Structure formats: C-alpha cells, structure tokens
Image (spheres, rainbow, N blue to C red):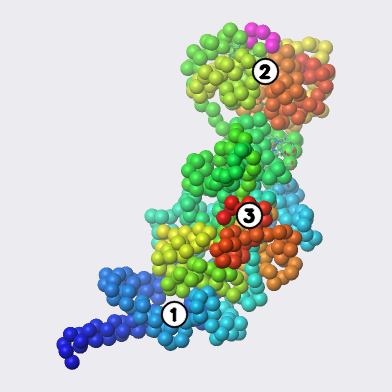
Amino acid sequence: MNKLPSEENMTTRDTNETNDEGQVSRRSFLGLMGTGAVCAGAAITATSSASSLLGHASGGNAYQQSDAQRIESLANPPKIPDYDWNKHKWAFGVDTDRCIGCLRCMEACKAENSVQEDANHHRTWVERYVYLEGSDKAIVDSQTDPKNIEVTGSEMRYRFDNRYKDVKVDKAYFVPKLCNQCEKPSCVQVCPTGATFKAPDGVVLIDAKYCIGCQYCVQACPYGVRSFNEQRGTAEKCNWCYHRITKGLNPACVEACPTGTRVFGDRNDKDSPISEFIRNHRVMVLKPEMGNEPNVFYVGIDKEVS
Amino acid sequence: MPKHIVRLLAVIAVIAIIAITARTYFKDPSFYQYGHYRGNAPAEIASKIPKLRGSDTCKSCHKAVYAEWTGGIHNKASKDGTSKTVVVKYGPNCEVCHTSAAGNHPSKEAMPLSVEDQVHSIVHPKHHTLATNVPGKKLLLSPEEARSVCLNCHEKMPGRPKEQRQIAIDSHAGVEMCVTCHNPHSPKIDFSFVPRMVAMQKVFVGNAVAGKSVSASCAGCHGATGVSVSANIPNLAGQNSGYLSSSLRAFKSKVRDNDMMSAIAAGMSEADIENVSAFYSQNSCKVTGGDRAKVAAGKAKVATAGCAACHNAGGLRGAGAPGISGSKSWPNLAGQNAEYLGATLKAFQNSTRYHTVMTSVAKTLSAADIDNLVAYYASVDCK
C-alpha cells in the first residue's frame, strides 16, 4: 500500500470533467457539427476512410492488432509504473456456492469508481435466482427491483429483501455479475471512436476522453454490463479496477467480498488464486453460445443464468 | 465546365479540407499506436488513485480496534478446501462497514477527499451524489445503521448458503440493536461486555394518557395499573416500554403465541401498542415476593448462570440493580410474579416460546435452578 505514488504525481483524467483542451474542443466541435448534420456525417466518414486509406486500420475486427501494432505493444508498452501489460493475463472467478447476496461488492465498487449511486447504475451487481416449490422456472431479481429499493429506504443503499421468507422455496442462490472482459468483445467492435478497446493483458477499457456517449456499446453487450453515466456523459463499465490491478492490488469487489466468492488473478502465474480456481473447479462462462469467450469463470450456476 | 459541377466539386473540396484538418487537429498522436485507440489511454486509466485502501492502512492509528478485528471471527482466514495454496478470507474488513473512508474520515490528513471527488463537486453540483453528500452515509455507523449492515450478511434468507451464520431477526434480536450484545469488530459474544455501551438507543414515543384508555380492556387480567390479578399473569407496571411493545408485536405476529394474548394483540393498532406500553411503563411496580427459603440459592445461581449480563442494569460488571435490564427493549425481572417467571423459563426450555438467546440460556437450567432463580427475582426491589 505505502508503495503507492503520492497523489500530486497522479492524474485523474477519467473524471472527464477536467478542462482538458483536446477533449472539450472535440466535444464542442462535434456539437457545432451537429448543427450541420450532413457535414458532420461526411467529416467523420471521410476521417475514418482516410485513415484506412493511410493504412492504419487493423484487420477485420476492431479488437485485433496489426503486426506493427503488436510489435509496438511488446517493445514499447504504456508507461505504467512497475507494470508491463505483456506479462499478465488477468481472469476472474465467481464461486456462486459461497455468495450470500450481501451486495457489499457493489457498494465497494461504487465507492472505488465513483459510479452514480442509485441502484440502476452499477459496474457490478448481484442477481437472485429463486425456484419456488413445484416450479422449474427461476424468478430473478436484483437490487434494482423496486421492493428491494424500498426495503433499504434509500436508492443509495443496496440490499435484498426477505420476500421469500414465508413461501416454500425449492432452490435459491445469488449470482454476482460483472464485465466478462471477453476475448472477442462486441462492444469494442461497435465503438465508432476507438474509445473502448481490449488491452493485451485481457482487460477491456474505456477511454472516457474519446467516448462520445453514443451508447452503441451499451446495446451491443450481450451481458448487459454497460450502462450510461449521465454525470460524465460517457459509457461506463467494470474494468476490474485497472488502476488497482496495475498496482498489484485486488479489484475493490474482491477485497470487499466477505466469503471468498470472488477470485481474481493472473493466469500466467500458475499459483495465482484464479489459476488454482480454474484448475480445481469445473468452471463455465455465461452465454457461451454468443461466442464472446468471456474471461469470468463461474462455478455453481444453472443453465438459466445468463 | 458547367457551373453546377464546379459548385459540387467546391463543396466536396471544402468537406475534404474540413475532414483532413479535423483529423490532423483532433487525432491524438498516440492513436493507432497499439490499435484503434489512444495509446496514452491505458496509462491514464491506470493512474487513478485507489480509494479503498485496505484494513492495514487503519492499523497505525486505530490500534485497539484493529487488534480486536484481526483476532476476531470477522477476520477469519482459512484454506480453500480445494486448493493447497489459496487462502480465503472470511468476514468484512474495515471498509465494508465504514464505507469508503476516503473523503468521509474525520481525520482529513489520513483520508483526504480524493482529487476526483473535489473535481466532481465543483463541476457537477446538481448531480452530486457522492458518498460525502449522502445524508447519513457517515463513517461512524449509528447502532441502527450498524444493524442494517449486519443484517445484510446475517439475516436468515433463502439463497444464502447454510455455511453463513444467519439469524431470524424476530426471535434473535427483536428490535434490539446488534451492537448492544455483539462487538462489531469481534462479534463472538463476550458476556462481560453485555450490554455494550451504545451511543444511541431507539426511543419509544407512546402517549401514556391515550394508553390509559386502551388499558381498560387489559385490567381484568393485568390489573388497573398493571399489577396482575393472578400469579400466572405477568405484572406490566414499571416494565420497560420497549419490551412491552415488542412483546405485543410478537403476540400479534404469533412469533410468541399465547391463546389469550395473541387474540387480544391481533386487534391492536401500532399506536395502541406504543401508547399502552408507555402507560404501563410509567406506573409504579410492586414486588410480589418469592419463596424466602429459595432466594439465597437463586442469588448464587444468578451469579454463575450469567443472567446478569442482560438482566442487570450494569451487566456482568455488576454496578447496576439486579433484575433491571440493561436495555430498554429487554424485560425487567425484578418483582415479577414467580409463577409466571417459572412457566416462562420452562416455555423457553421446550421452545413453546422461542428466543435464540433465552432458549439456549434456559436449556442450561435444571428445574431446581428455575425454582430458585424465580424466587430470587420475584423478591428483588423493582424500583
């Protein structure tokens, strides 16, 4: 902990509300163009086609790198103190058998990442699957359910109510959800500005400076992990606390979890918690049929969970 | 060349110039460095300052609390059953309960408002919904907030794995605050600290005058002022109002079931319950007296059975009056009818009346113990 660089040496660009010149003028430029929609449309098309003519564009998929770019990221990785993104392959495990549905992960995440505090904005959340006796269909709710909001007395607190206390429940469990940091992220493919991308260490990041808030990515994600942050005017999602993991810390939700449900680590390290987790459990991913190849591995979920 | 073609070419040229200028002017030099994105972005994202700093950061200043927590059940580390190397930590750490010390902490040197929050509060006063601005979301939890924090993890609920310790609220705590019996930092009960000094206790506001008229229907059994007409009916006079009202609610919901009382309580409104409780609690009690021969034996048993932890104003530390409970939501036993007390303890023993704590305590008592204990409590001064 005490190895952290002091606050003055650090930037906190992700707020995006700094009077950073490039970004604001980009915004106002687009605003200006908005008045002459034709011009703006033409300009953007021209820009991107021009760039592909100049040979910058990558192969078929936006998340793939050209050979030159791959060599660049190996030889000259971003300047993050004590961190080389080529040396890591992050992955996440969720053992739903342990989850008690306390939602402390969500609260810790919101504090850590300054996510909007109402129950409908979240980077990570928890769902409850309940099978009543004699029914094969799961009833699903999460902290956004009005009854669950009511029981906390405030939109700023998160909790599951005890509505199934007096009914016969056959089976019930909680499932934490978060960004899957897919190998083939559909959100990256649809982003028109290159504001979201997949880093070589496996994490899909959002560059708030380049995000124009068009919300294509929110639509594209098959797991619904993206939301729109009205405060910042940008898309928002879990990045496994990139600012923590690059400093050797665990993501905030993993730190907060009181039962060891959440497991995080580096798959390049054979002794890391996540490598052990994957080795010792039969794991599965959400919606494998989508072909996104998620990097969050689940234990203990039914096929209904998606 | 025809005029309209020239015009068209001019328009295309203008658009092309705008596009190329826009591109050279706005495109970040690091764009396309590693791919279709800004090459500087990863380092910028990584440079954010972590806000949750881990329990170890609290150690230097809060030594005593930290030691309690590390030694207690809320910081239990155990090997994951499936792996030899991975250690799983159970239990909440400091920042789970004292949500996000950054920006909230009374010691601003220790936990300054993060740069990010400062920026936010200046730029977006309207939408400002950060932890610092949410009323009641302070670092130090009030007992009621603490109760809701504890229940996040410990309320008995379908879906929670059975390995997690869970309690049914009504029969475990009623309206009482968890921190009166449990130290949040090391929650295994240490009876010598029960009841713990809690900064704020729930205040019951009933109207005693209005309660008097409600009490008319009770007088046949509980007497006009709450001194009962028969030894198997409890005295209510001078009883703690919090306990009276929680008992009436328990009868109403049948958590505590009694043929006579459940029927009566079923017809009472919340206001009736608070008012009649206020009425009885302000009346003066009357010691009914117990079997003299057994009083001394009972007094000795009280000392060893640990009843004083909760049924003595000073707890096991012993400073208070015996039989007067340490919390307003627990019953005073002083001067209560011996016959009623004896029947009640037996009811706890065979779970016809259930309360997690009292049921397990009562099971440690023999029939002779009960006789002696109730004789003692019936005889002690109830003022």
Main SS category, magenta section: loop
Spatial CA distance of label 1 from label 2 is: 81 Å
* Neighbours of disc 1 within 10 Å: few (<14), some (14-19), many (20+): some
The reply to whether dot 1 and dot 2 touch (C-beta < 8 Å) is: no
Residue B56, placed above or below residue A247 = above
Co-location on one chain, circles 1 and 2 = yes
Spatial CA distance of label 2 from label 3 is: 48 Å
Residue B357 in the image, given as x and y percentages of width and height: 72, 31
| A92 sits left or right of A30 in the view | right
Q: Which mark is residue A256?
A: 3
Query: Of label 1 and label 2, which has the lower sequence position?
Result: 1
Q: Which residue is drawn at 51% across and 61% down?
A: A222
Q: Give the range drawn in magenta.
A: B228-232
Q: Is mark 1 on a helix, strand or loop?
A: loop
Q: What residue type is labelled 3?
A: Ala
| B167 sits left or right of A76 in the view | right
Spatial CA distance of label 3 from label 1 is: 37 Å
Please check the rendered image and state whether residue B59 is part of the magenta-colored stretch, yes or no: no
| B72 sits left or right of A200 in the view | right
Pick the residue in front: A273 or A302. A302
* Label 2 sits on residue: B382
Q: Residue at x 66, y 15 (%)?
A: B234
